[in-house]
């Protein structure tokens, strides 16, 4: 199959000046007549997605040339919306022109000629729903005698719920509804209650509703959990393929409440300067490409840290156990080894798969106290106290080198929200950022820089951050 994205891009470029029938598109894109039926389906899908537009005369053109615009619609509390178009002014959509569109949907709109808004800005009408943002909506349930309905916050219409599909919800409950009929000019949308979230006055309920409303799932599917349960924890046969760093006094340094310890560090002084080891948990050993786990991790993208909870990207067996660099446990890692001279210049580096055994699970608080001379902690961690001193030296050298290169340190304060036992905001405070936090930041940035440089010189496509 040809690269359809390139084919579509080329077709749209040509359609800026010309119009084509389907037969002419076949010839333009050099598509075989033998697969005419398949290619017709492809062109139809492009038309359904609002990428091209079929006129009454049987010719295809660009939607923009016919007064249409494609974008994502935003619907607030009122009965109206706006079409958001990158680089352009938003288009106002009156409530009676939303035509079943919901907040976040990708739509094709037609620009109305008679703009009635006070500032004479453009107004539009939803012509087609190209893609629904979601089919699960959060709202407040209201019970009637033989049915119920849900009032969503960011939707222009109530959702009808038949008596058999209320799941026992009562008036005032905050619920999640799965929509199976989106409604039309005469009928309301219809759906069924799939979960009762709770009392809308409860903080925890509101946070759960916020997650559902943004398509964020806290729980993993049964398929993903089954896949995790099948993961073999014994990796003894893998050790011969890795560099053994278990003899080093490698440590993790994280916040006191951190559960997933995904990076560890070690520093030693050398004749030329310093050697830094940064080891990252090798998640790829456990998650293979194309598996349910891989697909779910790709969909989630990252862990989400909320005030009262963490939504992990990976199931906790992986994030808090197998892939967490817990102390006194053999762990599979990927290591970046960097040699610095006495002035902080990188004079050598290496990258390899490794196995480590973290000696201590350190916290930022304790490491900062060690730097401040806390005798009790210095005694407790005497085996690594000398290394911490060398870490601090290297951190300062790296930071000074960055300053000489023109690096800007914005030093933006990080805010911490503290909740009480009822999950209400108790206080807002500035999170302390001492030498330990800066040290880890310096080491991680240094590791990222040498990795980025290697990717650049070997011409490996990558996203730099």
Image (cartoon, grey):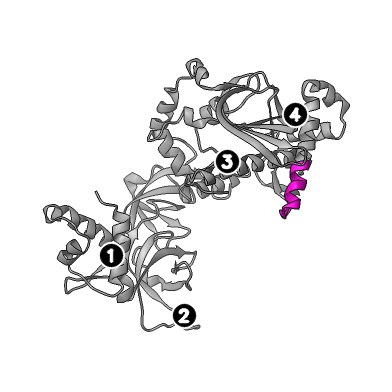
Q: Is residue 455 magenta?
A: no
Region rendered in magenta:
397-413
Q: Is residue 175 above or below residue 187?
A: above
Q: Residue at x 38, y 33 (%)?
A: 291
Are circles 4 and 1 on residues that touch, CB within 8 Å? no
Give me the C-alpha separation between circle 2 and circle 4: 67 Å
Q: Residue at x 50, y 83 (%)?
A: 119
- Residue occupied by mark 2: 121
Residue 70 seen from this side: yes
- Residue occupied by mark 4: 270
The secondary structure type at the circle numbered 3 is helix
Q: Considering only order in the chain, which callout, 1 or 4, is on the residue closer to the N terminus? A: 1
Q: Nearer the viewer, mark 2 or mark 4?
A: 4
Q: Considering only order in the chain, which callout, 4 or 2, is on the residue closer to the N terminus? A: 2
Q: Nearer the viewer, mark 4 or mark 1?
A: 4
In the drawing, what numbered circle is on residue 451?
Answer: 3
- Residue occupied by mark 1: 11
């Amino acid at each position: 199959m040809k690269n359809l994205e390139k084919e579509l891009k080329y077709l749209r470029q040509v359609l800026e000046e010309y119009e084509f029938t389907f037969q002419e598109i076949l010839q333009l894109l050099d598509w075989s007549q033998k697969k005419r039926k398949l290619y017709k389906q492809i062109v139809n899908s492009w038309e359904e997605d609002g990428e091209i537009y079929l006129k009454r005369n049987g010719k295809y053109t660009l939607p923009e040339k016919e007064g249409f615009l494609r974008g994502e619609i935003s619907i607030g509390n009122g009965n109206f919306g706006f079409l958001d178009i990158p680089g352009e002014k938003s288009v106002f959509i009156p409530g009676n022109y939303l035509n079943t569109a919901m907040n976040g949907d990708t739509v094709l709109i037609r620009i109305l000629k008679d703009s009635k808004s006070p500032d004479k800005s453009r107004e539009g009408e939803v012509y087609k729903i190209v893609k629904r943002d979601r089919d699960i909506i959060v709202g407040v349930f209201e019970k009637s005698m033989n049915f119920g309905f849900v009032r969503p916050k960011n939707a222009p219409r109530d959702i009808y719920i038949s008596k058999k599909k209320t799941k026992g919800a009562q008036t005032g409950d905050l619920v999640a509804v799965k929509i199976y009929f989106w409604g039309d000019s005469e009928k309301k949308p219809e759906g069924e209650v799939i979960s009762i979230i709770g009392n809308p006055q409860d903080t925890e309920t509101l946070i759960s509703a916020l997650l559902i409303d943004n398509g964020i799932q806290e729980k993993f599917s049964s398929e993903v959990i089954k896949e995790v349960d099948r993961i073999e924890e014994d990796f003894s046969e893998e050790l011969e393929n890795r560099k053994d760093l278990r003899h080093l006094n490698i440590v993790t340094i994280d916040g006191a409440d951190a559960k997933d310890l995904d990076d560890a560090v070690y520093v030693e002084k050398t004749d030329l300067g310093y050697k830094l080891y940064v080891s990252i948990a090798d998640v790829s050993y456990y998650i293979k490409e194309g598996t349910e786990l891989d697909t779910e991790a790709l969909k989630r993208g990252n862990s989400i840290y909320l005030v009262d909870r963490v939504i992990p990207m990976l199931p906790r067996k992986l994030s808090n156990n197998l892939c967490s660099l817990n102390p006194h446990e053999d762990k599979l890692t990927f290591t970046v080894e960097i040699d610095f001279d006495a002035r902080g210049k990188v004079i050598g580096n290496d990258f390899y798969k490794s196995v480590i055994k973290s000696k201590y699970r350190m916290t930022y608080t304790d490491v900062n106290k060690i730097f401040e001379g806390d005798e009790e902690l210095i005694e407790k961690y005497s085996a690594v106290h000398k290394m911490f001193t060398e870490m601090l030296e290297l951190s300062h050298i790296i930071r000074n080198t960055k300053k000489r290169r023109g690096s800007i340190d914005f030093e933006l304060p990080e805010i911490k929200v503290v909740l009480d036992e009822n999950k209400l905001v108790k206080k807002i405070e500035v999170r302390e950022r001492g030498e330990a936090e800066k040290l880890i930041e310096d080491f991680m940035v240094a590791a990222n820089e040498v990795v980025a440089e290697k990717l650049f010189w070997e011409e490996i496509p990558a996203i730099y951050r």
